[in-house]
Structures are given as C-alpha cells and as structure tokens.
Amino acid sequence: MSALPPLRVRRLGPADYVWHDGTTEARGDAAALAATLDRRGFWLAADGLQVRLVETPRPHPRRELCLRGLPYALEEQFACDVDALHFAPGPLTDPLSCAVVARAALDGWLQELAAAGLRPSRVIPEALLLPWPDAAGWSLWLTADRAVLRHGPFAGFACPRAALPELLAAVLAEIPAAPPQLFVWGEAAPALGLECVPVAGHPYAVAAGAPAPIDLLQGAYARGPSWQARWRRWRPLAVVALLWLGLRLGLMGWTLHRLSIEQAQLAGDLEQVYRTAVPSAVRVVDAR
C-alpha cells in the first residue's frame, strides 16, 4: 500500500465518481479511479442523503451488549426493519453517536467498486469528511443542488440545497446557542441567519489529515485481518506448540536411544548366560 494519504472519493451516480487528493479533483468511472489509485488507498464518502447520523443513550456499559442492543435502542427512529439497516457506532461514549445506512445501499456501493477490483479502506458519512472547527463554528459545503453540513464531531447531514434553511433551523432549535460562525465552501450561502465565512479551496483538502470519526466498514462489513495480523495473533501459541513438539520429539529420541542401549545390554547378558550353560557351543543360538 502507498504511503500517500488516502484519496477522498464521492460517488455521484452509477459508475460516476469524483475524487480529491488534497490539491486537485478528477472525475471518471471506477476503472479510471483504479488507474489513478495505483495501490493508493481511498476513503469513500457515503451519500449523506442515504446515511443518517443519530445519537442515543448508551444501551449498556459492556461493549458487547452495547453493540448488540444498539439497533433496538434506535429502532423507533426508523420506519423499516432494523435487520435491513447497518449500524456503525462512533466512540462508545454516553451518549453514543451512530451512523445508520440501509444494507442494500452499502452493499451496492461496495459491489460496484468490487467489480473494478476496488475496496475502500474506509466508508465515511459524507458530512463527517468536512472539517470540524470545534468551538469556532460549523462547516457547510454548497454545490449547485446540494448542501452538506457538519454541526458536531459526529453530527451532520446532506440535503437538497433548497431544504437547507428549514433543516438548519430545526438543528438550531435543538441547541442552547447558535454557532459563532458558519464556514462555507463552494458556492455563496443564502441568508441563513448566521455569520457566514467563505473559505477558498476544497473542504476535503482542509480535512485531509483528520482521523475518521465513524467508519461504516465495521461489524459485518469489517475487513478481515491480513495474514500478518492473523500470524501475530497466533504466533505465541505457535511458539508454544513448536516448543512442545520439540520436547516430545526429544523425549521420544532419548527413550529410543535408552531402549536400544538396554536391548544391546540384554543381548549381551543372554549370550553370556548361553555360553555358561553350553560351554562347548561354537555358534550362539538366539536365546529367544
């Protein structure tokens, strides 16, 4: 794998991708993306219209029971069966943040890339790929027809641009104080009732070095460990097994050597007894 930072890749539609390497942006199908990567990793931006970022009280203090109970803690927020959804939690704090996506959608994205021999190293909710300025404000990315807002470390959404004022007002109504500023990438922001600060460049370039807060590739979608990781896990047991095998082989060898010495000694004793019983014998007959 290349030492370069991973590309940020957005899926615009079937076989239509746009990717950003921190300085430049390009567009093409999965084959063109594969040619660009050349063993370099990439993060796939999960469509914010199909991924919901939600928050819930932690279901259980124990990690295993917390993860098992998470779908049922959130089921009332979704109209469909929780078995059709994939739940990807962030850090297991209380309250707990979680990204939720339909399994069919995530399967479709991964299968389309797999057909070109590609698999993303991470699949990140689109809003969480924007910079998080913390107390300084929120991040907003505007295109001709879409808006992507990040209003918390693990909170954000994407929507049609026309729906932004209404959804932003709903978010502001649920918090005690509005953010001091709204950092805006892309097109100019409409009147939103907040101080908007235009930012030049691409938001992915600003956030390129940030860690991934929530990765959808976990649970049933987690990448299997490499053979090196599996070997590291089993190496202590393998060393113990080899030591035990070596000890067993050594004991068997020593036992066989001891038995051969005893057999030779017994043969000598038998010959001595035979010669004593038959002193005139020229040839020793096998005493057995």
Image (spheres, rainbow, N blue to C red):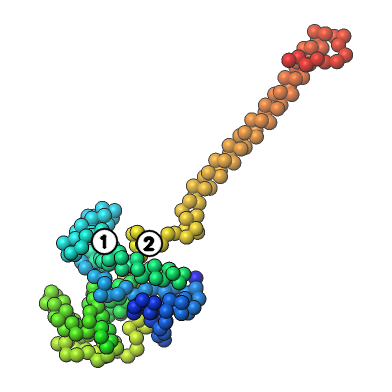
Secondary element under disc 2, as helix, strand or loop, is: loop
Residue 161 seen:
yes
Q: Residue 144 carries which label?
A: none
Residue 135 seen:
no
- Farthest residue, direction front: 14
Q: Residue at x 82, y 8 (%)?
A: 278
Of circles 1 and 2, the one toward us is: 1
Location of residue 172 by image quarter: bottom left
**Total number of numbered labels?**
2
Q: Which residue is drawn at 62% across and 37% down?
A: 250
Choose the circle earlier in sequence order: 1 or 2: 1
Pick the residue in front: 273 or 186: 186
Image position, residue 225 (x, y; %):
44, 59
Q: In the displayed structure, would residue 138 be above or below residue 52?
A: below
Image position, residue 71 (x, y; %):
23, 59
Q: Which mark is residue 222?
A: 2
Amino acid beneath label 2: Ala
Location of residue 115 by image quarter: bottom left
Q: Which residue is drawn at 33% across and 67% down?
A: 106
Q: Which residue is drawn at 85% across and 15% down?
A: 283
Secondary element under disc 1, as helix, strand or loop, is: helix
Q: Residues within 10 Å of mark 1 (few under 14, many from 20)?
A: few
How far apart are labels 1 and 2 at the CA level?
17 Å
Image position, residue 251 (x, y; %):
61, 34
Q: Quadrant of the C terminus?
A: top right
Mark 1 near mark 2, Cβ–Cβ under 8 Å?
A: no
Q: In the displayed structure, would residue 236 be above or below residue 81?
A: above
Residue of label 1: 84
Location of residue 67 by image quarter: bottom left
Amino acid beneath label 1: Ala
Pick the residue in front: 191 or 153: 191
